[in-house]
């Protein structure tokens, strides 16, 4: 049982953009947990994720209703404890339960002491026929009756209502339901449950809802089946949606939903600074790394806030970034915690990268002419190295065929250098060009 609620939502002034992070609910449905034989987030995982979300500046965290499983119910107390421990430092964070329009779901969430209930019910032809099996009139009656009771008995609770699969629900049918519940809730949701939306359809849907319900905040939830989740979320924010569901790395059912850090990253680039109040953006990349590590994987290469976005393998690119990284790094990733650039030694590297690696990272004594000669030999062998690191091939050539010697004063520190071109991770000592991570 959670402790008594010490703060009411009515006393909180929402920001222009409020992330409702659902890593602990939507994110827990990712197949990646199964792919890597983990299957679920442990209580320790959930506590660490909750703490990181609060320190990042997230004010709304969505979880499963306790009725989902005894484990989910048991974990809620630990999550509430870490939330309460950070109130003095970061202010209040609201814990929201994702509930069906079903009395058992609602009862379990209220008993557990959640700050709010995120109601949903399928409104599209597909969900009505294949999920709950109720017609529109019946589901509207049930939803309104339940919301009236909860609003009367628990006026302090934050209430949201969403028509599941809203983007495949006919306008008149969605409005028929929302007209009945709009006065009873704090937010109306517009979830793109199966990822069919486009920016144009988002603009149309959001515009229609804002026109019909001008006094109610809107919430967006966008799946990535078409690879448009972040684009659709950005369009929703542009059209006036205040609350956006995200998860860290965009993990979730099927292809997932909008990535929290990718959304904020794009808002910064679009100069929507007033949307970013209170978010600790420099924690973005460490947060992504933390979640990736829990999934036993690297931060996905398609995630904008990643070291991949500052990694270079082509010779032309490597030469340019050795002079000035802005040549091929156009975005302010350092503001999101990606503070290093990687130049990866490989078959596409040119003599500039090889010279820099041998001289500045491995501390060999050589000139440019020698580096060019070594590069010619290296290029003839690097495609046939099997599982050997390219750096090993290069250093063997440098020492055994060209007789290069290292600077004497640097020898005691060589093994402490961390950088990907060497492929020998040691202690976190900064390298001049490439770095660990």
Image (tube, rainbow, N blue to C red):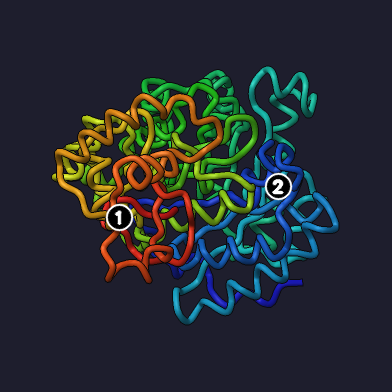
Counting from the top left corner in percent of width and height, residue 265 is at: 33, 46
Residue 263 in sight here:
no
The residue shown at (36%, 24%) is 380
Circle nearer the viewer, 1 or 2: 1
- Between residue 377 and residue 127, name the one nearer to us: 377
- Between residue 15 and residue 280, name the one nearer to us: 280
Cα separation, mark 1 vs mark 2, equals 55 Å
Q: Is residue 270 left or right of residue 257?
A: left
Q: Residue furthest right?
A: 70
Q: Determine crowd level at label 2: few under 14, some 14-19, many 20+ residues with C-alpha closer than 10 A.
A: many
Residue beneath disc 2: 99
The residue shown at (43%, 46%) is 217
Q: Quadrant of the N terminus?
A: bottom right
Task: Tell me the quarter of the picture where residue 45 sits.
Answer: bottom right
Counting from the top left corner in percent of width and height, residue 177 is at: 60, 31
Q: Residue furthest bottom?
A: 88
The residue shown at (64%, 47%) is 295
Residue beneath disc 1: 361
Counting from the top left corner in percent of width and height, residue 36 is at: 71, 42
Task: Tell me the quarter of the picture where residue 411 sits.
Answer: bottom left
On screen, 179 above or below 422?
above
On screen, 192 above or below 436?
above
The residue shown at (59%, 43%) is 161
Comes first in the chain, label 1 or label 2: 2
- Between residue 408 and residue 100, name the one nearer to us: 408
Counting from the top left corner in percent of width and height, residue 368 is at: 15, 42
Q: Determine crowd level at label 1: few under 14, some 14-19, many 20+ residues with C-alpha closer than 10 A.
A: many
């Amino acid at each position: 049982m959670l402790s008594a609620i010490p703060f009411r939502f009515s006393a909180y002034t929402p920001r222009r953009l409020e992330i409702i992070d659902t890593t602990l609910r939507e994110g827990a449905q990712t197949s990646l947990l199964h792919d890597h034989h983990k299957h679920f987030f442990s209580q320790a995982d959930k506590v660490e994720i909750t703490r990181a979300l609060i320190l990042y500046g997230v004010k709304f965290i969505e979880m499963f209703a306790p009725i989902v499983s005894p484990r989910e119910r048991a974990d809620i107390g630990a999550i509430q404890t870490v939330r309460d421990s950070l109130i003095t430092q970061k202010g209040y964070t609201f814990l929201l339960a994702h509930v069906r329009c079903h009395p058992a779901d609602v009862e379990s969430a209220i008993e557990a002491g959640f700050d709010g209930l995120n109601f949903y019910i399928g409104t599209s032809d597909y969900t009505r026929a294949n999920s709950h099996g109720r017609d529109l009139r019946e589901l509207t009656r049930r939803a309104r009756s339940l919301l009236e009771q909860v609003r009367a008995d628990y006026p302090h609770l934050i209430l949201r209502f969403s028509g599941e699969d809203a983007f495949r629900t006919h306008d008149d049918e969605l409005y028929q339901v929302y007209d009945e519940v709009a006065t009873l809730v704090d937010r109306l949701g517009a979830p793109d449950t199966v990822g069919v939306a486009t920016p144009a359809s988002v603009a149309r849907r959001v515009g229609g809802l804002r026109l019909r319900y001008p006094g109610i905040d809107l919430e967006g939830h966008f799946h990535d089946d078409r690879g448009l989740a972040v684009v659709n979320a950005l369009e929703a924010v542009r059209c006036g949606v205040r609350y956006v569901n995200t998860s860290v790395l965009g993990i979730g059912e099927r292809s997932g939903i909008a990535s929290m850090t990718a959304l904020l990253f794009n808002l910064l680039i679009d100069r929507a600074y007033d949307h970013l109040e209170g978010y600790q953006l420099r924690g973005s990349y460490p947060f992504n790394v933390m979640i990736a590590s829990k999934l036993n994987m690297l931060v996905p290469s398609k995630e904008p806030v990643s070291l991949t976005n500052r990694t270079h393998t082509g010779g032309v690119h490597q030469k340019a970034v050795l002079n000035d990284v802005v040549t091929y790094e156009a975005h302010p990733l350092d503001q999101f915690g990606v503070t290093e650039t990687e130049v990866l030694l490989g078959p596409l590297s040119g003599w500039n990268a090889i010279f820099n690696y041998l001289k500045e990272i491995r501390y060999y004594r050589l000139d440019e002419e020698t580096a060019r000669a070594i590069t010619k030999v290296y290029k003839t062998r690097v495609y046939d190295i099997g599982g050997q690191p390219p750096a090993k091939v290069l250093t063997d050539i440098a020492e055994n065929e060209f007789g290069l010697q290292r600077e004497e004063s640097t020898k005691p520190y060589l093994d402490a250098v961390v950088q990907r071109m060497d492929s020998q991770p040691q202690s976190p000592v900064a390298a001049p060009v490439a770095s660990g991570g």
